[in-house]
């Protein structure tokens, strides 16, 4: 057993003991990513961003797959794909600890785990004008938006084709989640929906990016009051 796995094992009891006391933020996140659909949920986390993610997956016996194959990188540093399940210890831990840490992205799709992994592997590399392949870290929330904009319309359509939705941290905004969805999947009257009035969409991007505020009303009011009193750099 590796040192990381031993450490994760030692943390398991503490993790389970504190879940009940820390479910509120993870519950808000769960509600945000399940709103409006009943698709299976997945996490795609960068093992290089947190070396203990893989160990926790093993300790809690969560099915998981490494997206990198034969890339010459240590297994622990691969992006790991895994299902998320409500009120399951690992999922509670991940949804509690991952926001604003840029560990990875959250996804929803009807694809099962193995087929989703195969689909995402198609988008891990990109060829430049000289024919050289580059690893593309689209699962890094700080890269996701630029990555999607860099795809051709056909590539972007293929990326979202399996009814894929994804969520990322909003870089620099610890309380905001960004929801990405293929624009064509919206109904024709989508702009009449008041919930979409503040959505941000890049011109000709063929996907819609919706900001979701994860703060409670009380938290938002408290932060607004602090800003009014000059206690923050708003």
Image (tube, rainbow, N blue to C red):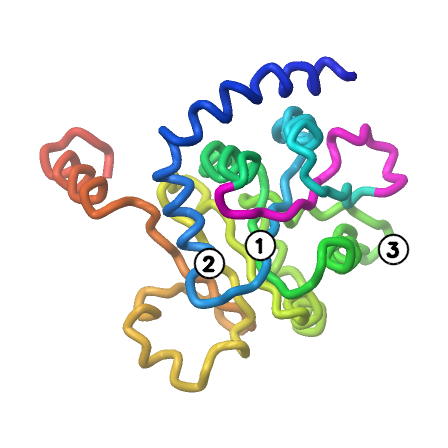
**Mark 1 or mark 2: which comes first in sequence?**
2
Residue drawn at point x = 54 percent, y = 44 percent? 142
Is 174 displayed left or right of 116 in the figure? left
Quarter of the rendering containing residue 198: bottom left
* Residue 25 or residue 9, whichever sits in front: 9
Residue drawn at point x = 52 percent, y = 65 percent? 38
Q: Quadrant of the C terminus?
A: top left
* Residue 163 or residue 110, whichever sits in front: 110
Q: Which residue lies under the disc numbered 2?
A: 34
| Cα–Cα span, label 3 and label 2 | 40 Å
**Mark 1 or mark 3: which comes first in sequence?**
1
| Cα–Cα span, label 1 and label 3 | 35 Å
**What is the x, y in percent for residue 175?**
35, 42
Residue drawn at point x = 56 percent, y = 70 percent? 182
**What is the x, y in percent for residue 114?**
77, 54
Give the magenta range.
Answer: 69-87
Is 112 displayed left or right of 71 in the figure? left
Q: Which residue is the extreme one toward the left? A: 229
Q: Which residue lies under the disc numbered 3?
A: 131
Label placed on residue 41: 1
Q: Is residue 80 magenta?
A: yes
Q: Nearer the viewer, mark 3 or mark 2?
A: 2
Quarter of the rendering containing residue 188: bottom left
Disc 3 crowd rating (10 Å Cα; few below 14, some 14-19, many 20+) is few
Residue drawn at point x = 51 percent, y = 61 percent? 180
């Amino acid at each position: 057993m590796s040192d990381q796995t031993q450490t994760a094992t030692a943390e398991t009891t503490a993790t389970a003991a504190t879940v009940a006391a820390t479910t509120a933020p993870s519950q808000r996140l769960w509600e945000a990513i399940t709103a409006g659909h009943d698709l299976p949920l997945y996490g795609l986390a960068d093992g290089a961003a947190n070396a203990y993610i893989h160990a926790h997956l093993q300790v809690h016996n969560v099915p998981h797959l490494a997206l990198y194959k034969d890339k010459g990188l240590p297994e622990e540093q691969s992006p790991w794909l895994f299902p998320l399940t409500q009120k399951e210890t690992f999922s509670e831990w991940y949804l509690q600890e991952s926001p604003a840490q840029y560990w990875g992205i959250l996804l929803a799709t009807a694809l099962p785990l193995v087929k989703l992994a195969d689909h995402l592997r198609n988008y891990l590399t990109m060829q430049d004008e000289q024919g050289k392949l580059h690893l593309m870290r689209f699962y890094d929330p700080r890269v996701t938006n630029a990555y999607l904009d860099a795809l051709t319309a056909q590539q972007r359509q293929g990326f979202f084709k399996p009814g894929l939705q994804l969520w990322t941290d909003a870089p620099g905004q610890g309380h905001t989640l960004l929801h990405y969805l293929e624009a064509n999947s919206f109904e024709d009257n989508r702009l009449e929906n008041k919930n979409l009035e503040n959505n941000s969409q890049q011109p000709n991007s063929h996907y819609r990016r919706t900001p979701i505020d994860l703060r409670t009303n009380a938290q938002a009011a408290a932060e607004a009051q602090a800003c009014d009193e000059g206690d923050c750099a708003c």
